[in-house]
Image: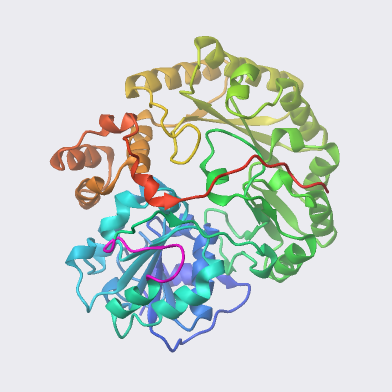
């Protein structure tokens, strides 16, 4: 019997297409090492859940809440499952994972699990970029996109209820599979889905309890043709592969039967060659459309007007910095004039709010560059005074595989000082800003750059609650210092994976 809080969550869920029930292979749980609202807003969770159910598994989900260590629908402890499939999108979620496994009666470390324990596997952007910090926790890690090799991997995993070792032996022959217990002799190559229209990616269900409340989410494509030097998503998902207009509409229409709210997601949503046609068609069919962040230079009046006509009330843009010259060094050559034009276009279309993302702690960043952020925001307010501005400021985290992977992270005290100066400059304009934590930036950098030596630190920090004090103590107990990861190590541990060269790309013509 599900606990009352889980039952209340389940009662809010409205399925777009029911998943197969029962299952003949065994019991599998999709594990998201964060809370239910965040996990149910992750398309990766929906994709994995759908694929496991279609392959013949009796499926469930598990989160940090409402009952950590137990599945949501059946309230079974994680130890009772044959397969635990973990998806990790963010490095800081690593700090929740050991505690979640142990709460369900599963030893967190692979070396402590026996033949009666579930097979514990992982995938997702963070572990694809650098699987090594989590390698001691998993039996199998998948590198890249799941769909192209799912038939082979699914057949191997189907052996798990009878024999964990047989499942792993079969999986070892599948491309993209990294077995931490059997280190590869060559880097594991990232798997890439070429025929994106053959594998739609969308929400299994909608719920008001998700962070993206009552929104049917659909992936509009993969990859990005832009050349931002700091961006890991471009490295993980090249080449740029937009889904067809017909394919997207076929995927979205069942969602419209359940909710009018449609969320269009994509790392390069603005570069989709048929975005305007898609939004106009959805508007005609009664949809309320929301979008992930849009590229500043792609906000044409017809697109903004079409979004506004569907009920969109706000847009999210990422100018990254107020300095045009510094923006050039990011690989994001956008003139401030273009941002101001985008703001006036949004206001003219009747939008209410504009959310702007900026970064600080960038290479070659000066005091003038920091001041330019406040100056640009003041110009936006002057150009579009009726728009409510929301501002988020985040320290740069140098990510593996990007051109800036070896960039030194600024000292925590300096990042904190820069963030404080930015906050004060906006407060003088009567604006509050969400400024990212310099301490957690250091932790995220360590988790991005570290190797298997981090596992004892992650385990200790997670068991102690995962807050910053627990992280400090866990690193100290493991004989490590967070500050040592402000510089990249050589050779970098993430060379265990091969993302393949990322060419310079251009967006396809409409």
Residue sticking out furthest to the front = 185
Q: Is residue 311 left or right of residue 455?
A: right
Q: Overall secondary structure of the magenta stretch?
A: loop
Which residue does the image show at 78% across and 60% down from the upper left? Answer: 245
x and y percentages locating residue 362 in the rendered image: 49, 23
Point out the image quarter for the N terminus: bottom left
168 above or below 144? below
x and y percentages locating residue 455 in the rendered image: 24, 50
309 above or below 50? above
Tell me if residue 391 can be seen: yes
Q: Which residues are magenta?
A: 172-182
x and y percentages locating residue 172 in the rendered image: 37, 70
Q: Is residue 266 left or right of residue 406?
A: right
Q: Which is more toward the observer, 154 or 77? A: 154
Which residue does the image show at 44% across and 22% down from the upper left? Answer: 419
Q: Give the quadrant of residue 301.
A: top right
x and y percentages locating residue 199 in the rendered image: 63, 68
């Amino acid at each position: 019997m599900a606990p009352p809080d889980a039952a209340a969550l389940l009662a809010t869920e409205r399925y777009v297409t029911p998943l197969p029930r029962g299952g003949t292979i065994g019991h599998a749980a999709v594990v998201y090492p964060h809370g239910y609202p965040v996990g149910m807003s992750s398309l990766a969770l929906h994709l994995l859940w759908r694929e496991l159910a279609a392959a013949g598994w009796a499926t469930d989900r598990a989160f940090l809440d409402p009952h950590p260590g137990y599945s949501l629908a059946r309230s079974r402890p994680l130890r009772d499952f044959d397969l635990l499939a973990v998806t990790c999108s963010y490095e800081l979620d690593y700090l929740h994972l050991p505690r979640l496994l142990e709460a369900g009666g599963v030893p967190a470390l692979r070396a402590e699990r026996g033949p009666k324990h579930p097979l514990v596997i992982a995938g997702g952007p963070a572990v694809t970029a650098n699987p090594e910090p989590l390698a001691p926790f998993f039996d199998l890690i998948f590198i890249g996109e799941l769909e192209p090799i799912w038939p082979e991997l699914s057949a191997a995993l189907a052996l798990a209820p009878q024999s964990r070792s047989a499942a792993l032996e079969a999986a070892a022959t599948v491309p993209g599979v990294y077995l931490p217990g059997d280190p590869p002799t060559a880097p594991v190559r990232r798997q890439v889905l070429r025929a994106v229209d053959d594998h739609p990616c969308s929400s299994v269900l909608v719920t008001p309890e998700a962070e993206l409340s009552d929104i049917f989410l659909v992936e509009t494509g993969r990859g990005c043709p832009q050349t931002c030097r700091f961006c890991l998503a471009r490295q993980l998902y090249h080449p740029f592969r937009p889904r067809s207009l017909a394919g997207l509409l076929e995927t979205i229409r069942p969602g419209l039967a359940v909710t009018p709210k449609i969320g269009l997601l994509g790392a390069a949503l603005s570069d989709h060659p048929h975005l305007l046609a898609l939004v106009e068609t959805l508007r005609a069919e009664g949809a309320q459309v929301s979008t992930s962040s849009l590229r500043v230079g792609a906000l044409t009046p017809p697109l903004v007007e079409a979004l506004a006509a569907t009920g969109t009330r706000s847009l999210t843009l990422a100018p990254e910095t107020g300095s045009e010259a510094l923006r050039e060094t990011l690989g994001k050559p956008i003139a401030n004039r273009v941002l101001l034009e985008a703001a006036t276009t949004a206001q003219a279309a009747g939008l209410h709010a504009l959310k702007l993302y900026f970064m600080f702690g960038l290479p070659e960043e000066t005091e003038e560059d920091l001041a330019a952020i406040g100056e640009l925001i003041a110009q936006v307010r002057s150009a579009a005074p009726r728009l409510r501005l929301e501002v988020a400021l985040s320290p740069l985290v140098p990510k593996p595989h990007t051109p800036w992977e070896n960039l030194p992270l600024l000292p925590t005290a300096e990042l904190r000082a820069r963030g404080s100066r930015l906050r004060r400059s906006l407060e003088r304009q009567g604006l509050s800003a969400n400024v990212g934590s310099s301490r957690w930036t250091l932790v995220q950098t360590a988790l991005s750059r570290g190797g298997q030596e981090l596992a004892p630190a992650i385990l200790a920090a997670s068991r102690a609650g995962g807050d910053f004090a627990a992280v400090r103590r866990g690193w100290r107990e493991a004989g490590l210092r967070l500050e040592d990861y402000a510089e990249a190590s050589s050779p970098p541990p993430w060379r265990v994976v091969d993302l393949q060269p990322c060419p310079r790309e251009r967006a396809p013509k409409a």
